[in-house]
Amino acid sequence: MNRKCCSFLVESNKLKFMEKQQLNHRGPSLLSDAAIDGLRTSSSVLGFSEGEAVVRKGETGKAFYVVVTGEVEIRLQAEDGRTLPLTRLGPGATFGEMALLRDEPVSADVVAVEPVTIMACPAASFKEAIAECEPLRSELMARLAEDLHNTNSEVWNFFQKADALRLLIRCENRPEPLVQESAKMRSVARTLSRLADERGPVLVCGEPGTGKLFAARTLHGLSNRVEAPLIIVDCRRVRSGDAGKLLFGSAGGTKAESSHPRPGAVQLARGGTLILRHVEALEHELQERLAVVASADRNASGVLVIATMRHEGRSPPPLHGSLVAAFDKNLIIMPSLSDRRRDIVALARIFLKEVDSKGSFHFNQEAERTLATLEYNHHNAGQLRETVEVATLCADGSEIRAEHLFSGASTEEGSSGLDLRRLLR
């Protein structure tokens, strides 16, 4: 076959339109546009004719593949020479990640059952892509977990796939150190250091944008589980009917589920850390089941549960009683920016480096004083970051001045900061 191979960067408008139409009509378990975009710049488009092998069993993993048009079939050769078709993959489906993640030979043949167009991300670029593109990383993790029960256990070893998932979800990029110039954040840092060596589960509370997830990841990084799996589940994004299986798996359910058990996040995080964002969104029945896992000795359950939830003040958290009891004294309350003003300038400098990687901008002293006096009531650190981003757009030179800062109302009269809410009235 005369194979067509060209970069997505120079692909014709016709092919781009066809690709988008195909990928937008995929099933819910396939890659999103954001994940596809994370692969584009380092990928090529390959064409295969009917019956042609895309990859062969035993080959070294060469790429991560996404079907753009047409269908491929995953096949295995039995000992008696028969071909065992495992499954068919259509537009938006992916394959090849197992060989790349485990650095092992390809497990089965993948053959085009009709003319197909496939996007291929070379092995050298794949790990960089999943490290840099959060949607791609998250969706591959979810995809592997979803597919664990879809193939015959005699063909693909169940635990082999679970191990590959652990490699994918391992937290390679440790969070930066906590900014703790304020007394309240120094107290939080001391609490995190203390809890890193304890066995019990941890609950992190606070207003939106106060760094609850950052604190949870920091706790994982401080512990002796730093090289172990780290799984993060946003409970608000899980449909109520699927939450139980996602968290606890399907083992012990129906006959089919018993034959092909499907792990949940608790099993996949064994030996490491499970972070549950917005834990209050779980139904009470699941909170009770979670309480049993969270309160168990980690030597038995094998996983540390860290839950985060939006909660203000020191009133009892709105959780089921058994789950509140499980967290017991291991409670961290993240202070708002108004309670840690000494940290604001340091945070703003960090955000400026992230927004302006070339170092083109800097705050003058008046701007830094103004940053410390503005209010960030809507989203705390998230709002501060937005303030910094807007300032880089408004600045007419390399110096960011007070008049370039737009955020909430100031705490001091005469501050140069502008309340954007007034523009919406």
Image (tube, helix red, strand yellow):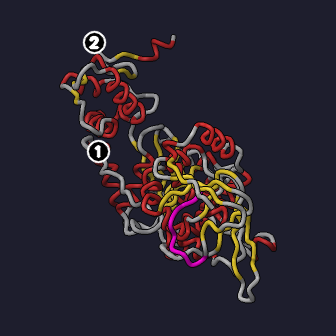
- Residue at 50% from the left image edge and 52% from the top image edge: 43
What is the magenta segment's predominant secondary structure? loop
- Residue at 34% from the left image edge and 49% from the top image edge: 188
Kindly identify which residue carries mark 1: 179
- Region rendered in magenta: 57-66
| Front residue of 15 and 241 | 15
Residue 108 point in image, percent of width and height: 64, 74
| Front residue of 266 and 337 | 266
Of mark 2 and mark 1, the one earlier in the sequence is 1
- Above or below for 39 versus 290: above
The quarter holding residue 85 reads: bottom right
Kindly identify which residue carries mark 2: 414
Instruction: Identify the element where label 1 is drawn.
Output: loop
- Residue at 31% from the left image edge and 54% from the top image edge: 190
**Which residue extends farthest left?**
365
The reply to whether the C-beta atoms of the residues labelled 2 and 1 are less than 8 Å apart is no
Three-letter residue code for mark 2:
Gly
Residue 276 is at least partly visible in this image: no
Three-letter residue code for mark 1:
Val
Residue 389 point in image, percent of width and height: 36, 29
The quarter holding residue 412 reads: top left
Residue 222 point in image, percent of width and height: 35, 61
Q: Is residue 303 left or right of residue 191?
A: right
Tell me the number on the disc at residue 234. Answer: none
Instruction: Identify the element where label 2 is drawn.
Output: loop
